[in-house]
Amino acid sequence: MTPEYRSGESSRRNERGRERNRSGERKFSATAPGERTRRADPARLVAFEVLRAVAADDAYANLVLPTSIRKHRLGRQDAGFATELAYGALRGQGTYDAILSLCVDRPLAQLDPAVLDALRLGVHQLMAMRVPPHAALDQTVGLARAVIGAGPSSLINAVLRKVSRKSFAEWLDMLTEGVEDPVRVSSLRHSHPEWIVRTMRQSLVNHGRSVVEIDDLLAADNAAPVVNLVALPGIGELDGALEAGARAGELVADSALFAAGDVGRLESVRSGRIRVQDAGSQLVARALAAVEVDHPPEDGEEWLDLCAGPGGKSALLAAIAAQRGYRLVANEPAEHRAALVRQALAAVDPAVWSVRVGDGRSIGESYPGGFDRILVDAPCTGLGALRRRPEARWRRQPSDLAELGPLQRALLAEALETVRPGGVVAYVTCSPHPAETTAVVQDSLRDRDGYVLLDAGQVLDGVSKSGSLHAGHESTAQLWPHVHGTDAMFLALIRRAT
C-alpha cells in the first residue's frame, strides 16, 4: 500500500499572530514554490540520498536506504514514505525520463545529475503517490534548494508544473501514441529497458506461457514486494511474527508474509531463527531436499550448496539436514560473502554444517567422495528479482549474459561430476532467461551420459502448500511474479544414474 502523503507543511501566523488559511486546506499557486520552502523534508532527503548513491557511487538501494533512514532518524511512517519514493522513482526511471524529456528544453544528459534525480522524485510523487501537486512541487523545490542550491529551483518548478498538467495515464497515452512496436510500448508503459522486455517475452514462450502475459509480468516487477519470512525447520517458530501482524504464507510451509513495518524488530529475525527469504527461494531449496535419492549412504547424506553466499538457502537446507541427521557444506569463493554465510547458518547446530572458501569449479578436488545433493544457485543476471532490486534493470546489459554463461556451465559441470551415483543436482537461477536456464541445462547434458532430468514441476508441487503451482514445462520449472507472487526462480533437477 502506498504510504500516506506528507506535504511537509506547518501552520503559519502573520505578523499579528493570526493563523492563515484556517478555513480549509492550505493551497499554493504553482508560480514560485522555491520562494516558500528552503529546507529538505527528511523523508524526501533520504530518498534523494538513495538515488544519488545509486547514480554516483554505483550503490545498491537496499543497502543505502536503511543506513540513511537511521541517520535521519525517521519514524515508521516517514520511513515507509521514503522507501516508496526512492524505490518507486528508481523503478519508474525509464518512463519518468521519457516524460521529463518532453518537459525540459534540453537533453536530459545535459542536466546536472542531482537535478535530474530531484526531478525524478518530483515526477514519482505527481504520477504515482497520494501527494497533492502543490506539495510535490513545493517540497521538491525545497529539497533542491537545501541540498543542491538555489540556482535550479526555477527550472525544477517549471518542469514539474508541466508534468502536473497531465495525469499519468494521459502521459502514457501521449508517449505511446503512434508507436507500433509492442516492445517499445511495453517498455514505455512499464519502465523496463527494451532488451529486458524482449527477454521476458522470449522467456515466457520458452517456459510454455503466452506472450500476452508480458504486461502482467512487467507490472508485477513494478509492484512493491511483500517481505517473505521462513521459520527454519526445527529451530524457529512463526508465532511472534504472526502476533506482530504477519500472515501465514500460502505457498510454502513455515512461511509468512510480513507487511507491518520493520521486520528487524522481531527478535526471532534478529536471532536468525526466522529469516527473510522469498517464497521462490524456499520452494527450490525444499524441492532439492524432497527429491528421492537412490541408494543413500548408511552413515547419512552429505549435501553441498556450491554457490552459498549470502546464505539464505544454505540456512534452510542446513536446518532440514539437521532434522535428518545429515550434513551440509556451504561453498563461497569470496571471504566477505563467506562471513555472511556463517552468520546465516549461526542458528543451526554447528556440528551439521561447514563453510568452505574457494572456487566452486574445483570443489571435487577437495571432496573426492562427492555429495548426495548439490544446489547450484548459479550467479546470474537477477532478472527474476527486478521488483526487489529497483536499480538492477538499468544496470544490467545484454553482454552480461555472455559473460555469465561460461561460469554457469562450468559450475553445473563440476556439480554433475561431483554428485554421487543416485544423487541429485538442483540447478537454480533467479532469472527466466533461456540463455541462463534451459540452454545451460541442455548444453551440460548433451554430451554427458548417465544423467536424468527429473520432473521439477512435479517436485515443486509436492513441496508447495497449494499442491498445484503449474510451474513445470518440459521437465524444468519456472516460477513467476505475476503468477506465483515469487521471484522468477528457475529449477532443474538432475539425477546421476547408479
Image (cartoon, grey):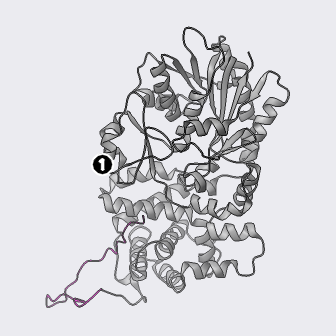
The picture quadrant where one finds residue 183 is bottom right
Q: What amino acid is found at the position of numbered circle 1 in the picture?
A: Ala
Q: Is residue 483 visible?
A: yes
Closer to us: 498 or 160 = 498
Is 2 one of the magenta-colored residues?
Answer: yes
- Residue 222 point in image, percent of width and height: 56, 61
- Residue 99 point in image, percent of width and height: 60, 76
The picture quadrant where one finds residue 3 is bottom left
Q: Is residue 265 above or below residue 498?
A: below
Is 380 one of the magenta-colored residues?
Answer: no
Report the side of 147 relative to 476 (left or right): left
Q: Which residues are magenta?
A: 1-25
Report the side of 280 relative to 422 (left or right): left
Label 1 neighbour load within 10 Å: few <14, some 14-19, many 20+ = some
- Residue farthest toward the right in the current orientation of the protein: 447
- Residue farthest toward the left in the current orientation of the protein: 16
Main SS of the magenta segment? loop
Quarter of the figure that contains the N terminus: bottom left
Q: Which residue is mark 1?
A: 244
- Residue 345 point in image, percent of width and height: 44, 27
Quarter of the figure that contains the C terminus: top right
- Residue 278 point in image, percent of width and height: 51, 44
Closer to us: 66 or 4 = 4
Residue at 67% in and 27% down: 425
Residue at 22% in and 83% down: 12
Q: Is residue 379 visible?
A: no
Secondary structure beneath label 1: loop
